[in-house]
Structures are given as structure tokens and as C-alpha cells.
Image: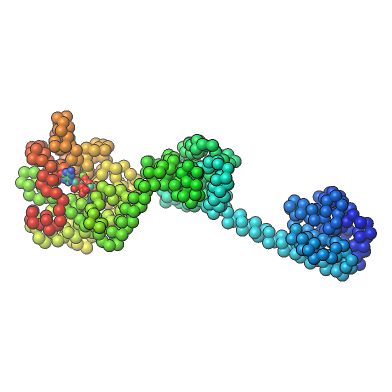
Amino acid sequence: MKILIVDDDIIDREAMKRAIMGSTIETIIFEANTVQAALDCIEKHAFDVVLLDYNLPTSSGIELLVNLKSKSIDPSVAIVMVSISTDDTIALKCIKAGAQDFLVKTEINSFRLQRAMVNAQARADLERNLLSSYQRTKILAEHDSLTGLTNRYYFDETLNRESHSHLRNNDKLALLLIDLDHFKFVNDNYGHDIGDQLLIEVTKRVKSVLRTNELLSRLGGDEFGITIINILSPSAAIRVAQRILFQLNTPFQIENYNINITASIGISVFPDDSNNDKELLKFADIAMYRAKELGRNQFRFFESQMQDEFLSKYLLENKLKNAIVEQQFFLEYQPLVCPQTTSIIGVEALIRLTVDNELIRPDLFIPIAEQSHLIFEIGEWVLKTSIEQLSIWKEKNTSPITMAINLSSKQLADKELPSIIEKYTNLYNVSPSLIDLELTETALLTDLEDTKKVIGELKKLGCKVSLDDFGTGYSSISHLHNFPIDTVKIDRTLMPSASKSLKLERLLSGLVVLLKTINVNIIAEGVETEEDYFTCRGLQVDAIQGYFIHMPMSAEGIETCFF
Ligand code: C2E
Ligand code: CA
Ligand code: CA
């Protein structure tokens, strides 16, 4: 055992040496008579035990003790304080300061000293183990094992602490929430290993643009957070956001794959937006969702009106969830008729929702349903209900009519869609050829490969496919060429009553001629007036639909007016 005796009194040192030598343990003894000599000695040697006098000149033993503990010398060094005083409060003070044991000089003998040193060593060992397991747990609790970044827990704690200290010193703090765009696609298509590697590489690039006062944490999945402390204006946040987006611009080379990934960033500023850390996080989150909505790969600052919009969306989303459970949705049907005979050819199913006697328009709730994935459940309900209706009509009406069903882009990219339709056509014994699936051009532009496959399957099943709202949006002729479209529905904005211009009227007739040459069926939508009706009849479109014929109505209404 290597022992250092620190005492300015040579007689006391000798007494301690004698006591040690009288014990049964083998020892090497060093001596120091001042604090400085002790420090020098400790620097050079690894001691097992330090016997430290409480009363040292110039700086006291307790100061040395505190100094040694704070310098975190090897924590396994056991320290036994010795003093001439029998005062218990001094003993307590020493233990509190980190000594493992305390001995009164007059009571020292070989046996007591040996026991004290052995016990002190055991305690020091125990303390060291406790400390290292505490440090390990702390690292685990505060860090993300994949990227090595601090985690959500640490981020929240820091934000909370910083917001309090900023409140005192009047500085601003910016909070950036970063969410990778379509990260799920990477996981689904390349596997989770590649996804993990991508997260590590993204972390490296993001870190490379940060300064020391900019803390990056991984908040979970593909979400990261940055706090920028002590800033004078939010421009620091703009700089960081721009650099991150720029860094992600270059594709990532992971194993043999070239992967493109972008991010959406929401920013909130303390105390401008809020002086509450939880609210600040919520606001950055709202801003991040806005960045996603606006097309991703961009950053947005929180603006107060976003909260109102967010709230009303949130309320509507809850109404939709509830409407599914309470079965508050119903369908109306708008007739499609032959322009020459005005006899019914088919109907378009249009979804309706009334909550507390108030009608909520599909234009309003379908986009919310699409964002929240509720569209899958709602869409399946529409399919089931309209196909069932078709089977009821098959019994009542002599000539079969078609059922046009609107599909959202999300449904169209869903590989399950063909089997869902097949399930209901089988269940209700309805021929898929009577089902006309209406797609919009936006649907054809998203998830191109999956969409193409699904449309192929739907055609194989025997369903018809229509391109809705033609004449608005992109209206790319190439869609007619790239997809197996049976029917084009010309949008109501091209009807004479809506267009009110000779040029548009000519556009309508030109369009009809063009569509006829490529052999697609033509339906004119939004036929509101007699003029619209005669124009469309003159152009010999295949079917017309609109208020001039009839508004959308209940199934019974269709039966009364058209069967
Ligand atoms: P859309 O597919 O273009 O449906 C035609 C819309 O035009 C319907 O509005 C219909 O009521 C309206 N309309 C019909 N004739 C006329 C007319 O002569 N003049 C005018 N001004 N409007 C006419 P609605 O029912 O409010 O539906 C709006 C949109 O909501 C639909 O547009 C469609 O995109 C969507 N939608 C409706 N039902 C469903 C559904 O079950 N699933 C999905 N994914 N979307 C649906
Ligand atoms: Ca439609
Ligand atoms: Ca339409």
C-alpha cells in the first residue's frame, strides 16, 4: 500500500509512521509537510491512501482535500483526515468535503489506523464505482446511440434552462426543428441499415455548419433540433437553416446508392414568439409543418396566424375521426346523362359530411383527410358504399349505369387499392367494368412508379379510369399518352357560362376535337346553363354532368328522377 502522510508537524508524522509500521500491511510511505509539497507528490505517484492533517499552515487540510476532489485525482485514492481536535463537527465537515474517514491524532494506534485505511479504501472504491455508473447512465440517458448526438431529453432540459437564463439577460434564442423529407421512403426502399447510415451522414453535414453556441440534438426518428443561444436577431437562424438546406443539396453516397434527401425546417424565436419553452417547441413544429405543406426543402418562421390555421385543422381532423366512428358520412350522386337523349348513363358519387347540422364541404375536409391518412378509411367507406349502391340499382334498373368514384392521390399510390375494390365488387356481385375511377392530375404526379403499377392493376381488374378536372392545373397531354385513361372530364371552368370568352369557347371545341382523335371518352362537367348544354350537345361529347341536368342528390332522388 502506498501511503502519503501530509502533516507540518514532524512529531505527528513520526507517530503516524510508527503506527503504520506496526500494522500488518506492507507499505511504502511518503511524507509532505506543506500543501504544495503534497500536491507535487500526488502528481508524481499513485497513492492508495493519503493521511491528511486538518490543520496545515498557509492553506488548510480541508482546502487541500476540496482541491484534490475537484481536480478529480484518481478517485480511488482514499483520504483519511487526522486532527488533534475531537470536535465532531470538524469530522463531519471533512467527510462532507469528500474524506473517507476521520481520526483523532491522540487516538491513533496501529490497529485503528490500519482499520481506517482499509475501510477508507473500500469506501473510495465504492464511490468510484458509483460515480462511473452514474456517468455511464447519464451519457446513456442524454445521448442518442446512433448519431452520438444529445437526445430529446437533453434537448428539452437545455431549452428549459436556457429559456430561463435568457429571460434574465434579455437575449434571444432561436429554435430550429428539422425533419427530413420522405425519410420513410429511404427506409422502405433501401432498408433500415441504409436509413441509419443516412442519419449518421446527415448529422455530420448538419454539424459542420454549426458554431459552438448552436446545440444539435436528435429528437427521434428523422427529427433534429437546434437551439441557438445568445443571439441579437433571428438572422442567425436563417443563416443556419440556409446552410443546412444547402449541405443536403449534394446527394449522399451510401454503400452503392446515391440518395437524395431534403429537409423541412421550422423556426421559432424566444421571446418574440413565446417565452415558454414548451410553447416554443410547439410553434417551431407548426412552422415545420407549414414548410412541408409549402412543398418541403425549405424553412419557415412561425407566424401567429399559423396557430389559428393549425388549430382549425386540428379540430377538423378530430371531427373527421369522430365522423368515421359515428358514421356521419353519406354519399350524394350526381347524374351523368347522354346529351342527345338526356337519359342516365351513370352517376358520380360525392361524399358529404354534416356535423351538428352544418355541412362541411369535401373541398375542405378531403385535403385534411389526405394529410392525416384518414383518407384511407374514408376512401374505403366511399368505395364500399357506392359499390353496394350500384348492386341495389342493378336490381331496380333495366339498363346498367356506371358509378364514378373519386380517388385521392394517396389511395392511388396504395398497393392495396386494387384488392380492396376487388373485395367489394365480389361481395356485392358488381362488374368492375361499371366502376369509373376518377383521378386528378396531381394524383398522376405523385409516387409515379407505385401509381403506374396500381393503375395497371385496376385496369386488369376491369375498372375504367377517368382523368378529372381536365383543363385546370397541368393538363399535360402526355398523361393521356402515359396512362391508360378511358375518359377525360373537361373541367367546368371551360364551359361557356363560366369562361365568358370567345377564346376559351374555342379552346373547348378544339380540345374536344383533339380528344376525339385519340379516342378517349369525353364528359363535360359543370354544365350549368342551357347554353352550356347546347354547346356540349353540338360538340357531341359522350356525357354531360352539371346543375343544368341535376344537382348531386340522394340515391332515392336518382331513382325518382331517372329510373
Ligand atoms: P369534383 O370531382 O370535380 O366533383 C364535382 C364537383 O362539382 C362537386 O362538388 C359537384 O357538386 C360540383 N358540381 C357539379 N355540377 C356542378 C355545376 O354545374 N356547377 C358547379 N359550380 N359545380 C358543380 P363537391 O361535391 O363539393 O366536391 C368537390 C370535390 O371534392 C370534388 O370535385 C372532388 O374532388 C372531391 N370529392 C368529393 N367526393 C369525394 C370522394 O368521395 N373522394 C375524394 N377523394 N374526393 C371527393
Ligand atoms: Ca370527380
Ligand atoms: Ca371534376
Q: Position of residue 141 (x, y in %)?
A: 58, 56
- Quarter occupied by residue 380: bottom left
Instruction: Identify the residue shown where x is 45% and y is 46%.
Output: 284
Instruction: Identify the residue shown where x is 39% and y is 47%.
Output: 307
Task: Please state the total of marks drawn on the protein image.
Answer: 0
Q: Residue furthest bottom?
A: 111
Image position of 223 (left or right of 4): left
Is residue 5 placed above or below 517 in the rendered structure? below
Quadrant, the C terminus = bottom left
Q: Position of residue 149 (x, y in %)?
A: 56, 49
- Quarter occupied by residue 483: top left
Instruction: Identify the residue shown where x is 11% and y is 56%.
Output: 557
Q: Residue furthest top?
A: 503
Instruction: Identify the residue shown where x is 16% and y is 29%.
Output: 503
Q: Position of residue 109 (x, y in %)?
A: 89, 68
Q: Residue furthest left?
A: 341
Q: Identify which residue, 402 or 361, lies in the foreground.
A: 361
Q: Is residue 383 visible?
A: no
Quadrant, the N terminus = bottom right
Q: Position of residue 512 (x, y in %)?
A: 15, 36
Q: Identify which residue, 298 or 231, lies in the foreground.
A: 231
Q: Is residue 443 visible?
A: yes
Q: Identify which residue, 421 or 318, lies in the foreground.
A: 318
Image position of 119 (left or right of 367): right
Image position of 138 (left or right of 286): right
